[in-house]
Image (cartoon, rainbow, N blue to C red):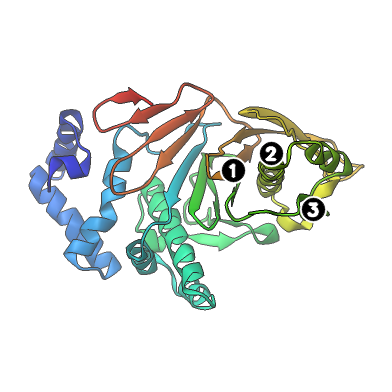
Amino acid sequence: MQESSRGLNSENVLRFGRACTRRGLSPAEGAALHLHELANDTGLSIAEADALQLPNAQWRVGLSARPTHGEIHVWRLRFSSTELAKLGWHVMTVEERARAESFRFARDRERFCQSRLLLRRMLGEYLERNPRKVPIIVGQHGKPQLDETISPRGLQFNLTHSHSVALLAVTVGQTVGIDVEDIASFSNPDVSTLAEGVLSKREVEAIMALERESRIRSFLRCWTRKEALLKAVGVGLLAKLDEFKVPMDDLERWSVQWRPDRRSDASTFQMADLSDDDYSAAVAAPMISGPVHLFDLHHLGLTDISVGEPQMRRSASEFVPL
């Protein structure tokens, strides 16, 4: 293993060495044993298992085992190759494979498999479990969640993906929702038609008053914020998007009052914008303490961008301002 490809610095090598010593193994023996265990668990070759564990070795650098109370971790995987889809297939359950095979087009199957790779590998790391054995069940209103009878750690998650990227939000002790939409997927759209049934009358009027070039980005910003909120609330498509409002400004953080019906008290949810140049995205939770930490999962390195603070790139050994 080359040190540069693993993203390890001297501090992390020492930390890994101490862990191996507790098991009576040398660092090299510990790394070899872990690789063979991963290959046996997933049915992959040693080379494939080595590629599969690469992002997670990088993920461990500088991160705690799981978020603290009120902290949000968001993992991003950009869809890049069929190899990632193949790796995802190896960690998926029988039911997930059947769902993947139900897609008509190969590109949709590949996106699904890559999203499952992100979901199962990261939850497996947080729970210290085999990715294939992460106990995901369908909760109320069809929202996936962890089976707390098997993994009683209070970990909550939400997964979303567009045509180009998957985002996974992870937190502890509270619900969370996340949504993403590619901007390029809406070329030359009729925004007024898209907004029907999605935005309130006042929101539609505000968007249509903008310059034509700004309308679609503003619409998607509003749409993803509403979807993220509904996922956090846990009602998903059961609620009507045009019956409540979210801020439409170019904000990074804000709070929203959610009232399921006129007889119920309102609940406060905090939200953060996660949009990039090519997509709109937002995350919502009852509490967001500190910045939302966004981590890129890929084979070249690990990026940690804190939403609400100066953006920084985390390498294996240092922080470098973007």
Using a 10 Å C-alpha cutoff, classify the residue at mark 3 as few (fewer than 14 neighbours), some (14 to 19) or many (20 or more): some
92 or 304, nearer to the observer: 304
Residue beneath the point at 54% across and 78% down: 104
Q: Can you tell which of label 2 and label 3 is closer to the viewer?
A: 2
Residue beneath the point at 61% across and 28% down: 252
Q: Label 2 is placed on what type of residue?
A: Ser
Q: Label 3 is placed on what type of residue?
A: Ala
Residue beneath the point at 14% across and 49% down: 30
Mark on residue 214? 2
137 or 315, nearer to the observer: 315
Q: Can you tell which of label 2 and label 1 is closer to the viewer?
A: 2
- Helix, strand or loop at mark 1: strand
Residue beneath the point at 45% across and 55% down: 119
* Residue 299 position (above or below residue 98): above
Residue 126 point in image, percent of width and height: 40, 45
* Residue 291 position (above or below residue 153): above
Q: Label 1 is placed on what type of residue?
A: Ala
Q: Quadrant of the C terminus?
A: top left
Q: CA distance from mark 2 to mark 1?
A: 16 Å
Reading the image, the residue beneath label 3 is 239
- Name the side, left or right, on which 66 lies relative to 190: left
Residue 22 point in image, percent of width and height: 16, 40
* Residue 22 position (above or below residue 117): above
Reading the image, the residue beneath label 1 is 281
Q: CA distance from mark 3 to mark 1?
A: 19 Å
Q: CA distance from mark 2 to mark 3?
A: 27 Å
- Helix, strand or loop at mark 3: loop
The answer to whether any part of residue 124 appears in the image is yes
* Residue 176 position (above or below residue 150): above
- Helix, strand or loop at mark 2: helix
